[in-house]
Image (tube, helix red, strand yellow):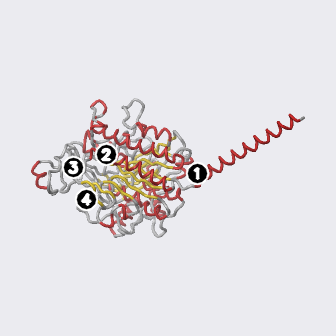
């Protein structure tokens, strides 16, 4: 009898202990989920959709992105994700504001001599999260204005380390910042225009040595690009450490320019059998991404979303130093001359490799074909952080939380693709995506390898492709078919429900262009 009582008491004790442990674990899980998440956005410059090993067909070629491939295996690969524009500054401005260039005022790239930047009337993702209690840091290429109030630390970032514009917009202390290589900066004065011009390097157009900024101070000029990845890596790890020590949620925005003008430092020596200079640069960038992921996993793995994407497609005129667009070849255009990648609205110009990683939240080893854009990063992160954007303006992105966390295919019903210099006026929304269909109102080409540029063409009625069966955009639909007519009618309907007027650029000419793009008139 006594033994039975003892066993009952022991069982009761074990049961209470088990219940206490279960409740404690649940409370810990609730606390983790109630904490505001950390965000790491990694933006790769000029990377091609086909550069991501996980996007390649088995046996297609050797992968140069093992860390990103692992992140895709442990997270979600987004196969129909698009940059907001096909060139640097407009794409970055749209990502940080959730608004097209015709709204935020950035429709083309800023230059070394630019005195302005992203209009001060625009509110960035960093500003909103900073006001909401986040520690905000940026590493890498800014390219949204580098003078006075336009610098990153005046646009919501607590800390900044990086270059103010592209890495080919200034000489460096070692040759190789451009391909073919430009000469290094000479000692002494940094006004180099006459010397470079006499040297016969037509692409060495800069007058200033490339600077490295920390916050608002130039800490190195000319910059040694071969050591830059090491500095970026150590700084990123330090940002993650600082945020953890503070017990503060953080936004880390890392904008990598490796693929813009490929570099090949000694630690990633180019190997012709593995793709040469471009592949070496891709491997170095991938190594940096892996270091950030590992540090994040060790710090706050289950509460950190990492979102990797690109700012636009490959710079095709660089020939062997450009990336791969995969199957998105823009054959209709290339058969008529010119390139169909960066600066164009062909798929190769704006469909970019994208991976979302958040252990325990984003389903592992998953793939989504939801139609998404860099414009969607702004509203999605704010939604996950539980903060609201300013209500006095219109936004062009959607909250993609259900896609990332719940595997739903509820992406954008349509996307507009702006001209980024290949045809028409900068920023004009000249191509529209409607489900699996894509309608061109204006076509044109960027410079291709070899120098051809093609020509601008207006399409009335619009030229429509079915991307589900024609990824290479080679064969437009016959305008007399029912399929074509249905898509054209949907374009007409969008005019009634979408207002794409710009807050800063509502000129009559731009408004007419918007109506033409929306309706096909």
425, above or below 350, in the image: below
What is the spatial separation of the Cα atoms under label 1 and label 3, in whole angstroms? 46 Å
Residue lying at 14% horizontally and 55% vertically, measured from the top left: 188
Quadrant of res 450: top left
What is the spatial separation of the Cα atoms under label 2 and label 1, in whole angstroms? 35 Å
The percent coordinates of residue 178 (x first, y second) are 22, 46
Left or right: where 286 falls relative to 297 = left
Q: Mark 3 points at which residue?
A: 172
Q: Name the residue under label 2.
A: 258
Visible residue check, residue 359: yes
Mark sitting earlier along the chain (4/1): 1
Mark 2 and mark 4 residues within 8 Å of each other at the beta carbon? no
Closest to the camera, between mark 4 and mark 3, is 3
The percent coordinates of residue 322 (x first, y second) are 29, 42
Visible residue check, residue 461: no
Judged from the image, the secondary structure of the residue bearing numbered disc 4 is loop
The percent coordinates of residue 504 (x first, y second) are 36, 69
Mark 3 and mark 2 residues within 8 Å of each other at the beta carbon? no
* Residue situated in front as seen by the camera: 316 or 233: 233
Q: Name the residue under label 4.
A: 111
Mark sitting earlier along the chain (2/1): 1
> How many numbered marks, from 0 up?
4
What is the spatial separation of the Cα atoms under label 2 and label 4, in whole angstroms? 19 Å
What is the spatial separation of the Cα atoms under label 3 and label 2, in whole angstroms? 15 Å
The percent coordinates of residue 243 (x first, y second) are 47, 54
Q: Name the residue under label 1.
A: 32
Closest to the camera, between mark 3 and mark 2, is 3
* Residue situated in front as seen by the camera: 260 or 358: 358
């Amino acid at each position: 009898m006594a033994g039975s009582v003892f066993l009952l008491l022991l069982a009761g004790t074990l049961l209470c202990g088990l219940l206490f442990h279960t409740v404690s674990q649940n409370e810990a899980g609730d606390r983790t989920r109630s904490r505001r998440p950390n965000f790491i956005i990694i933006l790769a410059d000029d990377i091609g959709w086909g550069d991501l090993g996980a996007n390649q067909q088995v046996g297609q070629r050797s992968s140069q992105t093992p860390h990103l491939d692992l992140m895709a295996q442990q997270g979600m690969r987004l196969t129909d994700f698009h940059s907001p524009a096909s060139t640097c500054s407009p794409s970055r401005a749209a990502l940080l504001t959730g608004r097209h260039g015709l709204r935020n005022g950035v429709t083309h790239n800023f230059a070394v001599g630019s005195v302005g930047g992203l209009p001060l009337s625009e509110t960035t993702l960093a500003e909103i999260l900073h006001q909401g209690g986040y520690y905000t840091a940026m590493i890498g290429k800014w390219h949204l204005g580098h003078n006075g109030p336009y610098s990153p630390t005046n646009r919501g970032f607590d800390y900044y380390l990086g270059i103010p514009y592209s890495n080919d917009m200034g000489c460096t202390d070692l040759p190789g910042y451009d391909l073919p290589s430009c000469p290094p900066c000479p000692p002494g004065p940094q006004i180099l225009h006459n010397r470079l011009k006499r040297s016969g390097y037509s692409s060495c157009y800069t007058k200033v040595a490339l600077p490295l900024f920390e916050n608002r101070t130039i800490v190195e000029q000319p910059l040694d690009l071969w050591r830059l990845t090491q500095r970026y890596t150590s700084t990123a790890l330090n940002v993650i450490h600082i945020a953890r020590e503070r017990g503060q949620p953080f936004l880390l925005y890392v904008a990598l320019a490796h693929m813009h003008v490929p570099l090949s430092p000694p630690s990633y020596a180019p190997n012709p059998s593995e793709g040469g200079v471009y592949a070496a640069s891709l491997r170095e960038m991938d190594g940096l991404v892996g270091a950030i992921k590992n540090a994040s996993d060790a710090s706050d793995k289950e509460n950190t979303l990492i979102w990797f994407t690109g700012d636009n497609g490959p710079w095709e005129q660089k020939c062997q130093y450009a990336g791969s667009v995969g199957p998105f070849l823009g054959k209709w255009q290339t058969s008529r001359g010119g390139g169909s990648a960066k600066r164009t609205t062909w798929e190769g110009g704006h469909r970019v490799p994208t991976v979302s990683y958040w252990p325990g939240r984003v389903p592992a080893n998953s793939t989504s074909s939801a139609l998404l854009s860099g414009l969607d990063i702004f509203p999605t992160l704010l939604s996950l952080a539980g903060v609201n954007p300013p209500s006095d303006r219109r936004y062009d992105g959607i909250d993609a939380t259900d896609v990332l966390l719940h595997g739903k295919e509820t992406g954008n019903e349509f996307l507009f693709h702006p001209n980024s210099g290949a045809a028409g006026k900068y920023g004009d929304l000249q191509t529209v995506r409607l489900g699996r269909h894509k309608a061109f109102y204006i076509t044109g080409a960027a410079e291709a390898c070899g120098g051809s540029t093609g020509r601008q063409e207006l399409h009335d009625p619009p030229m429509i492709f079915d991307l589900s069966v024609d990824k290479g955009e080679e064969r437009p639909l016959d305008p007399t078919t029912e399929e074509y007519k249905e898509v054209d009618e949907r374009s007409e309907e969008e005019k009634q429900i979408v207002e794409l007027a710009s807050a800063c650029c509502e000129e009559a000419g731009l408004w007419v262009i918007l109506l033409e793009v929306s309706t096909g008139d």
